[in-house]
Image (cartoon, coloured by chain):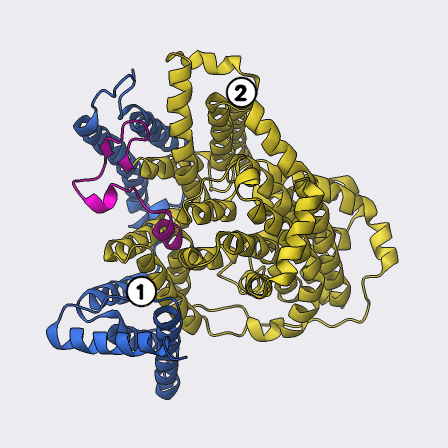
Chain colours: A blue, B yellow
Amino acid sequence: MLRKMMPLSRLAETVFWLAVAIGGGLLTLRFSRALSNYDFTSATWPRLILAGIGVVAVLQFLAERDRKVSAIAAAWRPGLPTVLAMVGGYLLALTWIGFYLATPVFMFFSLLVLGERRLPRAGAFALLASAFFFLVFTTFFYIAMPAGALDGLLDANIAIRETFLALGSIP
Amino acid sequence: MSSLELLFNGLGLLVTDPVALALFFGGLCAGSLFGAIPGINMLTLGAVLLPFSAQMNPAHAIMLYSVIYCSGVFGGAITAILFNIPGAPENAATAIDGYPLTRAGKSRKAVGAAVLCSALGGVISSLVMIFAAQATARWAVQAIQPADIFGIVALGIAIAATVGAKTIWKGWLSVLFGMLLACVGTDPIDSAPRFTFGSYALYAGIKTVPLILGVFAVVEIFSQLASRGTLPAVRSGGGSEHFSLSDLLQSRWTVCRSTVIGFFAGLVPGVGASLAAFVSYGSEKALAGRSGRFGRGELRGVIAAETANNAATGAAMIPMLALGLPGGALTAMMIGVYQLHGMEPGPLIFTTAPDIISLVFAAMLLANVGILLLGWVEARTVTHLVRLDTRYLMIFLLVISTIGAYAERNLMIDVWVMFGAGVMAWFLRESGYSMAGLVLGLILGRVGEASFMKAALLADYDVLAFFERPVAAVCLGLAVAVTCAGVLVDMLKRAGPATARA
């Protein structure tokens, strides 16, 4: 079954690059306007690159006909969907729940998902590391991280942020 | 200011400025630490620190990166020798003979050789850089025109495409994809928006910081977390035999040859320290013939690899400082540091910001001397380093990377770009594409387009006129030759197994 899928994956790799080249080429039609005092257009350079991608993709396909291992199949790892879901969840949480509340929770649960069974250790790490981030980046570097978008949580994030910002003004 | 004056000025600045000193020692230790821990390397550290360098004085920021460069290249040598775990690709060649030496009870000798020869190679290379960089910049101001810059960029792109990826085709696709990403934003001549999809955030182009964080830091984090960060079991070697002065004298020609190989490998854009170490190791092995014990515990193998990789660091700084052209991923990040501070690296930096150059000269020289101290400390602490639970480390780095991507413009889109780049880089890297090639494509693509546009305008759109300029002609000719050689080598590699099967 896997042997049958391999040529498809190799073909998929070539199709991907050709799609980039053709799709990109079509997009250049939208900004291919003549530049003032200039014979080339703003699309000349991107088109050269896109043509290069198309040519190299075809040459790669022809040159690697006898390749045994599929590139895309080789890239897959069983743990990858979990990691991607974890990180994707964190990004959404940053937007909605806010950095100051989402970060300790994310760190704690990520460690559990990754197989850590010592809960006090994971909890202590999440709290201490978060405090370190808030202190270094908010108190000392004045970086105001996202405060979220949900009403009650927004206020809580802002309160934490203001507390850490105020620490910086203590003489 | 002469080169010597710049060096002494830099030494004065470094020792009298507590912040610079703190960053120097911080960079020395952190570079070595990241170089030693398997799975992450100095590029991960450089990527994570990049957004925060905007908060620093530009001279301090560039100096920090140059120190990380020196200590990061050395960092993985000791883990390579003691545990057969090269912390970074630069030290992979060191493990080939270093670990067999440990198993033979000669770990002290191997570690001593690695420390001393790394320092020697680095110091010699830094000294040459100090005297050559300014002269190169002076020559560049008088002699270099846009067509020449385009030629040098083309050569850098051709080399970056030929090395680093699994095949030459993947190398070219990596570089071309980076160059395509560099087109997002506005046209360098007429500011026409390209590939912006109506988003104002994309008018400024793909920001270098989130992309670098994605392809170097996030991809490593994904890689370690997806494989649950399991490291090989730690084994320690014993031994009481030290690397003596007579050993060094016996290996003097190996040191000399490796320094020269490393220096020239570092000088050429796109080659870098990893390849320098392998080329040097390979040449020593070829010279030794059947008389050597290469692969089974030959001290010259360790010396060749470690001298060459550190000799490449000073050389790689010359095109970066004198021409503003990065030779590798870390020097590309240095270009990013310049841009974060609103500066354009290149020959004029020597007159507009001599303090930066002074500090870099002094810091690189001292960092290479500092390797002697680092080696002593690292050999005693490294057993604990490789036992770190990578799950904790990776989660910690993931949050720092997120803060870093967000901090530059306070926009969540940059965080999404970073993770998008990380996911894309995962598949590309695991499929054999070169991430260093992609980043070099991004940086060199911008320089290449601007110089191509200017040169075409000056040549009245006669592209063949580029070949009338000697530097451009030589570089373009070499670029074609490198590409043809790469294709030929690829075909021969492919034909080898086929012939064997027949």
Q: Position of residue B106 (x, y in %)?
A: 77, 65
Mark 1: amino acid? Val
Q: Tell me, for residue B477, which label it has, or none.
A: 2
Q: Nearer the viewer, mark 1 or mark 2?
A: 2
**Left or right position of B176 against B165:** left
**Residue B205 covered by magenta stretch:** yes
- Crowding near the residue tagged with mark 1, few <14, some 14–19, many ≥20 C-alpha atoms within 10 Å: many
Q: Nearer the viewer, residue B256 or B461?
A: B461
**Magenta region:** B185-214
Q: Give the SS element for disc 1.
A: helix
Q: Position of residue B203 (x, y in %)?
A: 24, 41
Q: Which residue is mark 1?
A: A83
Say whether marks 1 and 2 touch (CB < 8 Å): no
Mark 2: amino acid? Gly
Q: Position of residue B467 (x, y in %)?
A: 50, 14
Q: Nearer the viewer, residue B406 or A94?
A: B406
**Residue B131 covered by magenta stretch:** no
Q: Residue at x 51, y 22 (%)?
A: B476
Q: Nearer the viewer, residue B351 or B289?
A: B351
- Crowding near the residue tagged with mark 2, few <14, some 14–19, many ≥20 C-alpha atoms within 10 Å: some
Q: Give the SS element for disc 2.
A: helix
